[in-house]
Amino acid sequence: MRIAVAGARGQLGAALVHELAPAHETIALGRAELDIANDRAVSAAMAKFAPDVVINCAGYNDVDGAEDHPVDALNANAFPARAFAHAAAARGAVFVQYSSDFVFDGTKTEPYTEEDRPNPRSVYAASKLLGEWFAADAPRSYVLRVESLFGQAPGGPEPKGSIGAMVKKLLAGEDVVAFADRTVSPTYILDAARATRLLLESNAAPGLYHCVNSGSGTWLELARELANRLGVAANLVPKQFADVKLRAARPQYCALSNGKLHAAGVAMPDWRDALGRYLQTLRSEPADQLSHRQA
């Protein structure tokens, strides 16, 4: 397959290129190569590269910033999905769009499934849900909901997100503040990239899938697991979700079920296993690079 990856210089995009390139003709499109907010540019890129599959993993991820910049969030998370879906439909290509657990309100006490009704509570969440809806304009599209992304692909950008920040603080001996009552299903980017490849290669039924590492835990449990696997003494500072005021609302309980993905033949490893593999990649880094992470 010829596969075009938009947002290829980002954390997830780099993982996708790393996963797909050995077996497929992979076209990496970063911001310099493609302005995803420009519908004509998206259409022209599809005409130029004529991919069998186009994957969009670019987006606006500043959850709090989106409250003050809603147009920016829509121009990155919603409208490009529409442009890609229409371009893919015109060429008979498959379209893959990534979404977020934030489309839910977080009031459940058991993992959300694809059948649960979204109820976004922030501008960011609404922009991601609109992206899901627009993606469905392509006759053959996959929408993959991920959350709390972590990890680094070989040659990819420095890890971002809460887990990467926790690792830095643990290695530096700093306090780690973590929610004791906010539950997540984190997603290792290399596992999400592998799941994407397997869905495409198996010609699985198109539609909406949750694509996270199996199981769930509170942020405090994640921090404790990281400390144990790193073998460091940690000063963990528990916080209650209700005690922290954030600009944008977050779902308190946002574990996702992988049942539909598993039924399609794609098993996602447990989040503890994923954390262990991620930390193993850090241990394999040259000493000077690891020291830089601790600085």
Image (cartoon, helix red, strand yellow):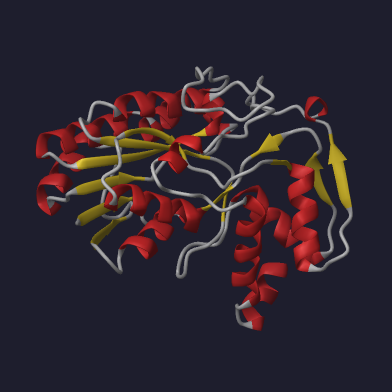
Residue 281 left/right relative to 97:
right
Residue 147, image x and y in percent? 55, 41
Q: Quadrant of the N terminus?
A: bottom left
Judge whether 189 appears above or below 155 on screen.
above
| Residue 68 visible to an observer of this rendering | no
Is 26 in front, or is 82? 26
Judge whether 249 appears above or below 290 on screen.
above
Residue 282 left/right relative to 10:
right
Which residue is drawn at the image coordinates 30% and 42% (left, top)?
204
Q: How many marks?
A: 0
Judge whether 229 appears above or below 138 on screen.
below
| Residue 109 visible to an observer of this rendering | yes
Residue 192, image x and y in percent? 46, 51
Which residue is drawn at the image coordinates 53% and 17% (left, top)?
119
Q: Quadrant of the C terminus?
A: bottom right
Residue 87 left/right relative to 218:
left
Which residue is drawn at the image coordinates 38% and 62% (left, top)?
19
Residue 289, image x and y in percent? 62, 76
Is 120 in front, or is 142? 142
